[in-house]
Image (cartoon, rainbow, N blue to C red):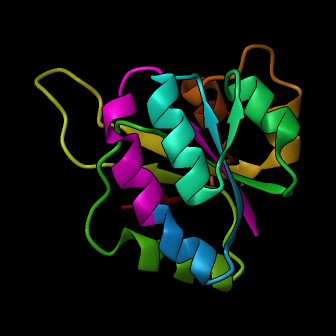
Amino acid sequence: MLSVIVETADAGDRLPALLAALTSLAVEGLVREVLIAGGGPQELLDVLREETGAELAPDIAGGILAARSDRLLVLPARIRLKAGWLETLAKHLRSGGGEALILGEGAGFLREKPFGVLLARSAAVGLAHPDLKRLRGQLGRGAARLA
């Protein structure tokens, strides 16, 4: 089971759609909890917490510390995931797949595609000021690329 940490720093407006997409993983028993890290409009967060059962964390580091699962899926709220990504992730997890880079769709000119990471909690706990780029650096060379 996964603890999902959704970092909201730059796209809280996309958070509801991402949480809705994650619901099917929870129904399949692959997601244990969702933590919303980084804040956002309090009214929106209150509604989302009530509707999804997500918890709040002050930032990614707080989410990592609060996570109850040994495996983390850390995603930015702004990520747009390709159709079928849930099935790809579920297949990866069920087959015992390890660390992975989750690639999002779209990017502007000279802008990096949004990405998320799937990694062991133990690889993230010791990082000072963890962010997605540092977490990506923790992925092993054999990490899968899921789109």
Is residue 98 inside the magenta stretch?
Answer: no
- Please provide percent x and percent y for residue 7: 54, 32
Relative depth, front residue between 35 and 113? 35
- The C terminus appears in which quarter of the rendering? bottom left
Relative depth, front residue between 128 and 80? 80
Is residue 8 inside the magenta stretch?
Answer: yes
Relative depth, front residue between 102 and 3? 3
Mark yes or no: residue 146 visible.
Answer: no
Outermost residue, top direction?
A: 129
- Please provide percent x and percent y for residue 86: 44, 72
The residue located at (29%, 29%) in the rendering is: 112
- The N terminus appears in which quarter of the rendering? bottom right
The residue located at (41%, 42%) in the rendering is: 15
- Please provide percent x and percent y for residue 33: 72, 58
Report the span colored magenta.
1-21
Left or right of 85 on screen, residue 141: right
Numbered disc total = 0
* Image quadrant in which you'd find residue 124: top right
In the displayed structure, would residue 26 be above or below residue 4?
below
